[in-house]
Amino acid sequence: MSKSLTKRSEDYSKWYNELVVKADLAENSSVRGSMVIKPYGYAIWEKVQAQLDKRFKETGHQNAYFPLFVPKSLFEAEEKNAEGFAKECAVVTHYRLKTNPEDPTKLMVDPEAKLEEELIVRPTSEAIIWNTYKNWIQSYRDLPILINQWANVVRWEMRTRLFLRTAEFLWQEGHTAHATRQEAIEETVQMNNIYAEFAEEFMAIPVIKGRKSESEKFAGAEETYCIEALMQDGKALQAGTSHFLGQNFAKAFDVKYTNQEGKQELVWATSWGVSTRLMGALIMTHSDDKGLVLPPKLAPHQVVIVPIYRSNEQYNSVCEVAKQIKLNLENAGVSVKFDDRDTHKPGWKFAQYELQGVPLRIAIGPKDLEKGSVELARRDTLSKEFVQQSELVSIVKDLLLDIQDSLFYKAKAFRDAHITEVNTFDEFKNVLKEKGGFISAHWDGTAATEQKIKELTKATIRCIPSHFKNEVGKCIYSGASSNQRVLFAKAY
Amino acid sequence: MSKSLTKRSEDYSKWYNELVVKADLAENSSVRGSMVIKPYGYAIWEKVQAQLDKRFKETGHQNAYFPLFVPKSLFEAEEKNAEGFAKECAVVTHYRLKTNPEDPTKLMVDPEAKLEEELIVRPTSEAIIWNTYKNWIQSYRDLPILINQWANVVRWEMRTRLFLRTAEFLWQEGHTAHATRQEAIEETVQMNNIYAEFAEEFMAIPVIKGRKSESEKFAGAEETYCIEALMQDGKALQAGTSHFLGQNFAKAFDVKYTNQEGKQELVWATSWGVSTRLMGALIMTHSDDKGLVLPPKLAPHQVVIVPIYRSNEQYNSVCEVAKQIKLNLENAGVSVKFDDRDTHKPGWKFAQYELQGVPLRIAIGPKDLEKGSVELARRDTLSKEFVQQSELVSIVKDLLLDIQDSLFYKAKAFRDAHITEVNTFDEFKNVLKEKGGFISAHWDGTAATEQKIKELTKATIRCIPSHFKNEVGKCIYSGASSNQRVLFAKAY
């Protein structure tokens, strides 16, 4: 398979699809809309998981596991909440396959093994979890409940794209229960902040924190907080959400607690999640026409070492030095892959690790042995230099920090250059067409205007940024008065 | 809820069920056969996962993720392999719920959203994975493939028990592909050894390594290796299996590679797994009538500190010292929970942590402050002693090692005392009735005899132990000649 990718400028979407497959991140499976996450892609996801899990635990959360299946009746209890998403979902109706009597090489669903009540493969777990919390919560002593779950969920999507929108995806979903409204809101904001810090510090993705408009928020929530990122093609991507659910689920599932005064109160709730969609954001923020570019903090291997040789003798002496270099780097906390396979040529390896976004590449050959040097290549800038082996560890450590930072600042500069303030609808349409990115504009606060703008331009309100100050102005569409700008964009 | 449990001697099964729920490990959910794994139970499972994952990676395996759903046709390709388990499974037939037009408060499956091909919720992933490997393997350069998956699977069980047998459970499944028969067999044995070492070193569960008989092995395997443990009630529990699959799946899914001579060959396969069933083994190996007993290496908290006080002033001064003790222990690598909640009395806490199997409990009160002491209680022996605070860290570290070892040796002594050699079928039935445990007996090697013994006694061949030497003898049932003893037992 050729390693060269379609150029981003030619067809961004095609570039993305090719990159995901050729860099061995993921591929489509024989199940419509479900992907296979390949080992290299999964190794990045494991790093995402480990970091988030650490932060969740540091803030007092524990992991647990709830059933994959949700009885249909629980969705009925929640239905008014779930309307936005609960309709297109995988439904289990039977529990047995049997040999087809008309053709014993085939299997068929056994019509006698029909479930009394259909089971839904969870699209999200609020219903099953709140139906469980009901039994866990009696008194204020039982609160707060701070639980997270790492799980697979299924939403029956008609148009799917690897990582960005798949029928089955992996995610984490936090579900917390609180005695007071204030505490639940603080939790919601705290988790959105954790997502933002993680995105910026580890993924090197600058994000804007804010709240969703009424039409864009999760149907079951009173308020949805989110982080919004900007991709290289000027489209926004929602990278994480944190919902203040008010007492909606407590009402739907009748979850009450006895407060310190002995009175029954409804419980307050939050939920928050990020998914394998983050992988899509990671790819589309940093990568280039040569392939993936990974921030060192999430790279499965931060450094790859490729030996250069013509003879067995050269191979042996080069490998000996390379192994020592690997050891020195690992002792300094750097993760290293030494690709000493004799089945692939150095040129193939160079192209492969460029495609896979390994932050630094060390090539070492017979001449380097003489000079005590190595060739050190940096993936993000594609620059190369010769470095003395004796200085290698400290140079590598510095470079890894530098790459992590410069990926973030490069993405931030791009993002900041793509936030445009407009004051008329003509300007709005023009910026959207010519430049893309986030458009900061006044909006009259009505769902009708939001809907109309979406119909006319495909742009939606991504968020009402937390850092935006009140400002008096006029809605770009209706001309009605407005006291705050919001951010519009076309989005993934 | 009362903390006292049914005694093991009264009703072992009831004791187990009560313990799982009261120690906050897991509970039944509103979905038939599916459990909720509660935070405390899940924290133990996370420790199991972390250790196994480390061992898998050290032996060159990588994690990946494959789809939850398996198209029915893939089971047809594999059917002859899967006959043993693939029949009772959750079948997805539709992809939409809609409001019931006859009662808008109800949902119904939309009959128009019927899938063209039914999807099976994976009971195991051989089919979907080998259908994927087919595209990954062309040449000997692509081999071996060493992949593991952490996932949920579903088998439609009619009689379920928390952890031991549930419709949905969590597990890991390794699926490897090799160029040669020899390499695949070595992999199969290696992974069974890893399971055995993990069980003994971390879970403190002594296990017998061996092979399954033809009728007990996985239907798709040429050979199934396993580890077998013995529970306190004299029943065996299969704690892990590793399958040498031969070329069965390569044939079913047409997976060939070009060898170094340019010839096409079928690929050799293994699969291996352990599941949340291990939690059941852990509980039933060590626990007592007071509740769970945990080996320190898998305990979410190795030490719990409970403050004793009558006044606010006492509370403050006790907590100050307790916090310092916690810090000292944590700096020595010990995991500590300090339960300073004022909402629960010390007696309640003592009972709770006994029930939850925390290996060591430290109680500290005003008198201890005067004397520079603490009360240190050991969960496994229920013994208590006063210890000087200055010596606490080193005593705790020694005791944790001692508890880990003595749990293993206690279980091993019990297990070894419950392996009985018999030479007649009367003896066999008698031992099974009076004593239980493993029975070492000659068997003629036929499935017919095995089946007959099972019908008459409910005992099955647990394994043909690897360490058993050849020995000439006569089958206890048929009297036919035999050259090796095997282990029988009643089993979970």
Image (tube, coloured by chain):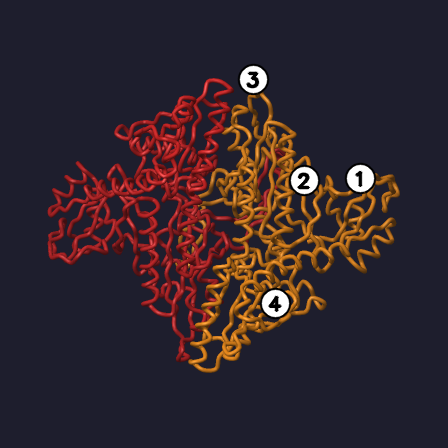
Chain colours: A orange, B red
Q: Earlier in the sequence, mark 1 or mark 2?
A: 2
Q: Earlier in the sequence, mark 2 or mark 4?
A: 2
Q: CA distance from mark 2 to mark 4?
A: 40 Å
Name the residue tied to disc 2.
A224
Say what secondary structure mark 3 lies in. loop
Say what secondary structure mark 4 lies in. strand
Q: CA distance from mark 2 to mark 3?
A: 32 Å
* Left or right: B244 in relation to A259: left
Using the rendered image, report if marks 1 and 3 lie on a common chain: yes
Q: Chain of mark 1?
A: A
Mark 2 and mark 3 residues within 8 Å of each other at the beta carbon = no
Quadrant containing the N terminus of chain B is: top left
Which one is in front in this view, the residue at disc 4 or the one at disc 1?
Answer: 4
In this view of the protein, which residue sits in the foreground, A480 or A395?
A395
Q: Earlier in the sequence, mark 4 or mark 1?
A: 4
Name the residue tied to disc 4.
A378
Q: Earlier in the sequence, mark 2 or mark 3?
A: 2
Using the rendered image, report if marks 4 and 1 lie on a common chain: yes
